[in-house]
Image: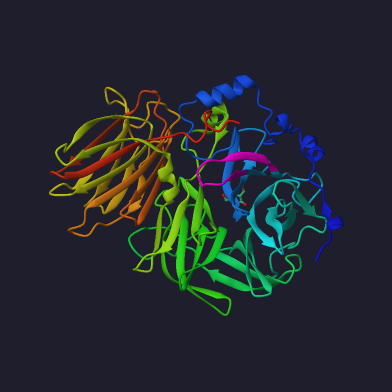
Amino acid sequence: MATRRDFLAFSTATLLAGRIALPNGAGTGVDQPENERSKLAADFQRPRYHLLPPANWMNDPNGPIFWKGQYHMFYQYNPHGAFPESMHWGHAVSSDLVHWKHLPIALAPTPGGPDKDGCWSGCAVVDGGVPTILYTGVFPQVQCLARGDDGMVTWRKFAGNPVVAAPPQGIRATGFRDPCVWREGEEWYLAIGSGVEGQGGVVLLYRSRDLIHWDYLHFLCRGRKDELLPGKDPVSTGEMWECPDFFPLADKHALLVSTQGAVIYSVGAYENHYFRPEVQGKADLSDSYYAARSMLDEKGRRILWGWIREGRSEAAQRAAGWAGVMSLPRVVSLAPDGRLRITPAPELETLRGKHHHFDGEHAHGAFPIRGDCLEIQAEFELGTADLAGLTVRSSPSGEEHTSITYNRTKAQLLVEREHSSLSPDADRGPQGGSFTLAESETLKLRIFLDASVIEIFANDRACLTSRIYPSRPDCLGVGTLAKEGTARLKALDVWEMRPISGDRLTR
Ligand code: DQQ
C-alpha cells in the first residue's frame, strides 16, 4: 500500500499554474465575471433541471459514486472555455440525485506529469476507506491514480504514476483509456477501453491487489469491426471501445461501451474472467447521448449517467460560453426478455410542479399548456395511423416546432428536427432508431423537456436523447399529431418542472 508521501498534493497553486483562478473558494475553475454569469443564467437554451457546470465545456461522466450518503459526480471539464481541450475533472455532489452543488475541480493536468495534456475519463472506488480515482493521463494514454480525502474534495496524485504505462505488447491498440475498476474478493479488476487495429473494439482486463501494481490478463470481451448489432439497427460496434462500464445485474453481467458513435450494451455471462455477450442493444437511440457510466447506490440501484452533447456549431457553443449537459439519472435493471430496462429515476418526480391532465376527448392539435421545462407523459392508441406522437417547443405561429413520433411502417422512434430552429447553427437531422410496438400495444411516451435538452423514454424499453435550439424564447407550445390515419390519445399528463437552482446552476 502506498503511503501519503507517495502522493503529490493537488493544490490551489497547481490550479493557478494552469491559469485557473478559484472564485471565492467555489473552486469550479471559473473566475466568472458577474456579467458573464448573468448572461448564462438568462440563456434560455441552458437547462434548468439538468446537471451542468457553471460555465465552459463538459463531456463524459467520470467516476460517479455514492459515498457517505451523497452522490458524487465527476465529469470531463475544460475550465478555459466551451471547447474540448485541457481536460480536468469537474465535481458536483447531491444528496437526492436531483439537486447539485458544485465542488472544486478534482483533478487538473500536472505540468510535466503523465497527465500533462489532460486528465481523461475514469472511475472512482473506495479502497479500505480511502476514495481513489483511476483515470487516463494523456499523451500518450496511460492509467493514473489519485487518492481523495474523506469528503472527496481534495485529491492527491500518486507520485509513481502512471500505474499502467502502456497497452499489452503485441496488440496494435487503437486506444488505451477510460479505466473501470471493481473488486472481487481480495483482488481488484480493471477494464480498459481499447481496440485492435483493423479488427474491432476490445476491453482489456487487468488484476491487482493494491490498485497500483497491475497484471494484464486478457480481453474481457472483444467485438468485430463491421459487426452489426443483432436486430434492425445497423450499428457498427467499431474499432475502438471507449468508457467501458462493467457490472453485475441480477444473475447476469452487463457491459456498456461507447463505440465513437453510440453507447452499446451487452448482457451476458461472466465466467473465468471472460465476458460472453448474450443480448445486445443500444443504451440510447441517439448519438446525442455518449460515454455512459454507472454507479451503485445505497438502495442497490444501478444508476446510469451519460454525456448529452451539443447539437449546434462549435462557434455557437463558444459564443454561448457553455457546452455539454449531464443526462438525468436513469435506473438500469434486467427486463424479462433479457434486455436492459432503462428508466428515469423516481426521484425526478420531486421536481414536478403544476399538473395538467387531458383525456382522450382532446384527440389532436395544440393543448393549452406552455412550457420549455416540462415532464410529459402521453399514451396513444395507434388506431389506423402510421405515425403518432407529440410536438413540443412550438412557436405561436408554428414555424418552429419539434416532433417526437413513432413511425409504424419504419418501426422507429424519431425526433424530427427539421423545423426545430430557424437558426443556421442548429443541427436539423432526425434522431432515433429501431423501436417496434406489438400490434395491440399502446405507445407510452415519457418526455423530459428542459430548454435545449429532450430525454425520451418509450414503453420502458427505449431511450432517445436529443438537442434542439429554438431561436425564439416563446417556443413553448405542446401538441399531438397523427398521420396517415387516426390515432387516439388515451391520456396526457404534463407537469411543469421546478428548476434545481435559481440561476441555471451558474454558481
Ligand atoms: N472522452 C474522454 C476520453 C474518452 C472520451 C476525453 C469519450 O477519455 O475516451 O475527454 O467521450
Whether the magenta-drawn stretch holds residue 101 is answered as yes
Considering every residue shown, the one lying at the far top of the view is 35
Q: Is residue 85 visible?
A: no
Residue 33: x and y, percent?
A: 66, 22
Answer with the quarter of the image where residue 92 lies: top right
Quadrant for the C terminus in the image = top right
Which residue shows up at 70% across the image and 70% down it?
A: 169
Answer with the quarter of the image where residue 395 lies: top left
Q: Is residue 404 visible?
A: yes
Residue 249: x and y, percent?
A: 48, 68
Considering every residue shown, the one lying at the far right of the view is 5
In this figure, which colouring scheme has been used for the structure?
Answer: rainbow
- Identify the magenta region: 92-105
Rendered position, 357 above or below 437: above
Q: Is residue 162 left or right of residue 436?
A: right
Q: Is residue 396 left or right of residue 43?
A: left
Q: How many marks?
A: 0
Toward the viewer: 476 or 348?
Answer: 348
Whether the magenta-drawn stretch holds residue 464 is answered as no
Which residue shows up at 57% across the image and 49% down it?
A: 61
Which residue shows up at 75% across the image and 68% down it?
A: 210
Toward the viewer: 488 or 359?
Answer: 359
Residue 41: x and y, percent?
A: 53, 26
Quadrant for the N terminus in the image = bottom right
Q: Is residue 152 left or right of residue 98?
A: right
Residue 298: x and y, percent?
A: 54, 59
Rendered position, 364 above or below 144: above
Toward the viewer: 402 or 124?
Answer: 124
Toward the viewer: 455 or 68?
Answer: 68
